[in-house]
Amino acid sequence: MTANRDETQGAVSRILQQSQAPKSISQIRKELAGTLRISSKDLTVLLEEMTAEGEVYSWPQKKFWDRNPRTVLPDLILAFMAKSTLATTSNIKTSLKLPLQMVEIALNDLVDKGRLFLWHPQGKASYFCLSEPRKTALETILNALAAGPLTEKELLASVRKKLPGYQGMDLKEHLSYSKQVYEYPKYGKVKIRYGLQPPEPGPYLGKTVQDITAIQSLLAPFRISLETIHDALGRELGLARETGEPSKAPPKGEIASPDAEPLLLKAMTRLQPFGQRRALVSIRELRHSVGLAKGVFDRVVLSLALQGKVALHHHDFPSSLSPEERDELVRDEQGTYYVGIVPKESP
Amino acid sequence: MNPNPLAAIPNPFRQTIVKDAWESLQDVPEIHAQAFETCCRAFENVRTSRHCDSVLLHGGAGSGKTHLLSRLQRHWTTAAGQIGSGEIGRCVFLYCRLQTSPHRLWQHLRRTFVEDLLHRFPDGTTQLQRLVACRFAEGDRNKRRPAAKWLKWMTHPANRDHGGWKRILLPWLEREARVGFSLRSVLYHLITGRHVLEAGAWLKGEDRLPEEAMALMGISGNEEGQTEDEAREMVLSLCRLASPLMPVAFCFDQIEALQTSKDDEESLFLFGQMGASLFNSSNNALLLSCIQSSVLDQFKGAIREADFDRIAQRRETLDPLDKKLAHLLIQRRLEWSKELAPLRAQHARKPLWPIEAADLDSSFGSSPSQTARKIISFAGSLFEKVQTGQSSPPRDPKEFIGKQYDRRRDVALGQGEAESDATLAHGLPLLSETLGGQWRKERQPDKDIDLLLSHGHKRVAVSLCNHQNMRSLSARLKRLMDWHTRNKGSELVLIRDGRLPISKTAVVTKSRLESLVAKGVSLCRPDAETLAALQALRSLISDARSGDLHDSGEPIGPRTVEEWLFQNLDSRLTAFFGQMVGASETPEEADSEIMNGILDVLKTHKVIAIEKLAEEIGQTVPLIEDIVKRHPGRIGWLQGPPAVLFDYRPDEILPSGEGEEE
């Protein structure tokens, strides 16, 4: 055997190198070409020697491979997860046919390294997943809401398809991180709903419409039309115009500064994490979130700073930005570009 | 004529940069008081909740981020912060400036952790000794001996050989910190004050310890050399020495300095991973991370949301100062000057004397606020004007950068070989970027490849082999032999500090090295001057990127620094880079005709647009581009548009007088 040992060893190395999975002694033996084939006993001895030399690695269930289980296992797990997206430790262990302890160590390491995430549904076994549960939930929520507002029950049902065991309290927590979802208030029989746009007043006016219809029936003998009631209602609500022309809401972006200031301050709070009033808000993000015309936005931001309501943070090297990037910032008359805004530190 | 009494008084506004959170400075607690409170709340939260907490601090360049960290350091580590409490410190304070390669973050953190653990306070005790004393006092259920007493007992020379050490300390380290044998032994030496240099070097991950030193400490070496995983394990083990009652405050400063270019997001991502890993793997860490406001969007976009949440459990902002705070800052600085005190006493009604409040306010222009550094610099120039009657002359940023470069290079010349690896790992990507960025940095394919550069089809894999321990070097060379066999498509370059010898007895190492060279692997041995130039380059760019390079309060940006470096780059660095990427051959050896043509034109024109040059020598623009990019040390290149080439020859080969033109 000594004379052929090197050849056999080379052949075994090649078999294991080309293999896509660990192989048992009998599998390796079968693949050895006729002249190189040795007894199972000799092959076992040879493999043990190769293992001691670090040329091959011993795998559970008396298998061997040229790859280190500790190095390869994370990739095997990630490959499995790419197919199943969500799995328990037990699912992974069964699929890889490896000891639980070994799988658990690799899973913990992957979680530590941020390559896998844990989803802990209340009262159920924990799942591992490839993307962060909160992110998955938020993406699902945003996709579901893209079609229109939904109730909590409807939202939960859509998220549960991706995250089993998803509960109302998870939804509340995850929505607290989202800056894009509005919670529509409950009013009378109108339930709490969620949407990507501010609520339409329509659904809240059901009772009012009934009342107005009743009033119109009541006043019909006096030839009071619905238009006349509408005008009167406008006057009562302080919306009446002297000219009698229909009122026009100012186009978006043309809001005057006094109206825009509270709008901006409110948007700023919305962009900050809950309870963190000292978190710097990106000017770019704020601009996108309020949708004011550039001139109005810039004026209001600078005015708020002059009034001492906000502090502005400047960019030290605006020349390193492209003209488009600079355009998204706010520039004062001295040519300073501001990148961040925050409510002023209280004395 | 009476001489001006202020003329001889040192300008109290000269210091505008806090280099380090360990610096003890005069402080104005009213400034950034809210941020300070938030950090203190987070700190208390770690102590009470026994969970990690974090604060992300935003601020512009010169807003006082490092100053705030210095205030926190004093508050948490000095007895003055806890008058009457009997405590000798409330946390392990770490200040980590991130001027390092993003792929060696953990190694850098390990080194900083150890250096700060061994930081000595004025009473001669180290943070490590204080930590152990506090932990012993914590464990003393009867509270008979407070931490201060334990510390006194521990540091008393008579108790150094006390038998109780081995009975108490070693089991405690094993039980509480769950650390391995070698680390336990090394900590034992450090705490009892034995073999401090050797033990400190081992703990930092340095591999230069001779066998005798290892034997003295009763431990064995690590042949693998230091890896990121190993460094991470060490950091987490050291974290376990602390407890939630004595947390570890990690202060990360200059996160932007990790970036090799403005668009580099990978380094921010890696920082996020490290921060989240620290957060997840311990229950006694407070993470304070400082980042410039202008990087806010990029930082949020570059790191994973989950990592961001861990690093930024709380967010705080260091606002620029309004006029009221600016006056207070200047007043305090004036009050701290003992030399000024008698003169100021004569102007009791003018708190800012000898500076006029209106003059100071003019630094604000129409803006309601200004950064602390700008205000101090402006006040400095006003003070100088009062002293001399003249305004400061206008400054030339290029001259300033030149002086800074020279100063930093001179300092770096005094650095030992132990620093070379970090200098090369961080400096080489920056050098590549400075030389025009034609060589693209790619993802590291292997732990033994420190940098992979590509240009067209050519790939150059760089491995840093600055090991002082020959066994570690030999092991790396063996792995590199395997790597080279598997990756024929890449050229492999080994870099080893020219000052580091290969021991005569290291037969295997030598033979492996020779074998690699025989297979076409290049070996570069940069000398001390080249490494000092690289160190100066990386420190200048890092400071500029994090807004800490400024001339009279005006920050100098990385682009200005890179442009200056490009035009004034040390010829050693260009030659070194050329050698590294295999472009150091003479023009006669490759592309000789075209190269000679280009050099001929540049001799006459000095600076010329690439299109015009192509026309003159009758070649195509892409061909010239290709040749020029392959010879970065020979011809200067300014990316346009329009792209411009210029005669770039090291000073020493220029005829006298020619080199002074610029």
Image (spheres, grey):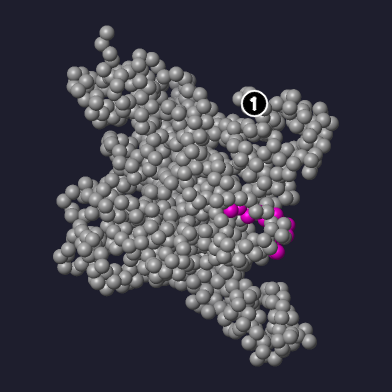
Q: Position of residue B211 (x, y in %)?
A: 46, 66
Q: Is residue B479 visible?
A: no
Tell me if B182 is positioned left or right of B559 in this view: left
Q: Is residue B543 above or below residue A67?
A: above
Q: Chain of mark 1?
A: B
The quarter holding residue A235 reads top left
Tell me if A231 is positioned left or right of B90 in this view: right
Q: Is residue B401 visible?
A: yes
At horizontal 65% and vertical 64% (from top left) the residue drawn is B511
The quarter holding residue B328 reads top left
| Residue closest to the eye, A96 or B543 | B543
The quarter holding residue B627 reads top right
Q: Position of residue B372 (x, y in %)?
A: 36, 31
Residue located farthest toward the top when viewing the structure as drawn: B1
At horizontal 41% and vertical 38% (from top left) the residue drawn is B59
The answer to whether residue A191 is magenta is no
At horizontal 67% and vertical 61% (from top left) the residue drawn is B514
Q: Position of residue B498 (x, y in %)?
A: 58, 50
What range is drawn magenta here? Answer: B484-496
| Residue closest to the eye, A47 or A75 | A47
- Residue type, label 1: Ser
Residue picked out by circle 1 = B656
Q: Position of residue B470 (x, y in %)?
A: 55, 63
Residue located farthest toward the right when viewing the structure as drawn: B618
Under tag 1, what secondary structure?
A: loop
